[in-house]
Image (cartoon, rainbow, N blue to C red):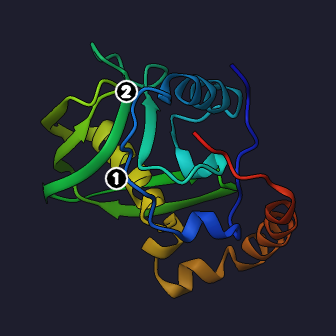
Amino acid sequence: MAVREVVHYGDPILRKVCKPVKDFKNLPPLIDDMFHTMYEESGIGLAANQIGVDLNLFIIDISDIEDEVESVHIFINGEILNSSGESWFEEGCLSIPEVRLEVKRPEFIQFKYQDESGNEHIEEMSGLLARAIQHEIDHLKGVFITDRVTKTVKMTVEKDLKMIAEGAATRAKTRKAFIL
């Protein structure tokens, strides 16, 4: 179990569409590292590419915010099948530290995913869990919260994004690829 470095805005891996998980047997140590990293960074979700791993895998833990029976989640090869409604909410991102933006997303989703054993599930979700899933799915498709706002709103954080990206580019050159 280890805390990994969170990859920041500007690192090329964050703009890639992540590869599907095909081999499930070596995932447990990676998932443990992801949870340790997310908790260390005080986040509620983390996609694998945010720690430099090119896999369609993300985790969510909203237990500090919502009392729900199941608040800790592992989602593999996730896909939003349907969505409806809309809601606005201020979102932050571990890969864009200190930047928070109001983002509009669907309120309800139908979500298909696999668990750590490879079993497929289809569930209806709403509220914070649905929003967090959509945020992490965006990561796995190379999309940031800054891509979900108007150009005018994005301009308000351009200076921050430029500084974050400069540091990320330097770190990306020295990062070793994680191999399962």
Mark 1 lies on a secondary structure that is helix
- Asked if residue 34 shows in the view, the reply is yes
Q: Which amino acid does label 2 sit on?
A: His
Which residue appears at 65% of the width and 51% of the height? 52
Q: Mark 2 highlights which residue?
A: 73
Kindly identify which residue carries mark 1.
134
Q: Do the residues labelled 1 and 2 touch (CB within 8 Å)?
A: no
Amino acid type for the residue under numbered disc 1? Gln
The correct choice, above or below, for 146 with respect to 46 in the image is: below
Camera-side residue of 66 and 29? 29
Measured as percent of width and height from the top left, residue 134 is found at 34, 53
Label 2 secondary element? strand
Residue in the foreground of this view, choosing between 43 and 117: 117
Q: Residues within 10 Å of mark 1 (few under 14, many from 20)?
A: many
Residue 177: percent from the left, percent from the top? 70, 52
Looking at the picture, tell me which residue is in the foreground, 43 or 112: 112
Q: Is residue 95 left or right of residue 83?
A: right
126 with respect to 176 (left or right):
left
Image quadrant holding the N terminus, namely: top right
Q: In this view, does 89 lie above or below 115?
A: below
Q: Position of residue 78 (x, y in %)?
A: 29, 47
Q: Choose between 64 and 171: the one closer to the eye.
A: 171
Q: In which quarter of the image is the C terminus?
A: top right
Q: How many dots with numbers?
A: 2
Front disc: 1 or 2: 2
The x, y position of residue 67, in whole percent, is 34, 16
* Among numbered discs 1 and 2, the one appearing first in the sequence: 2
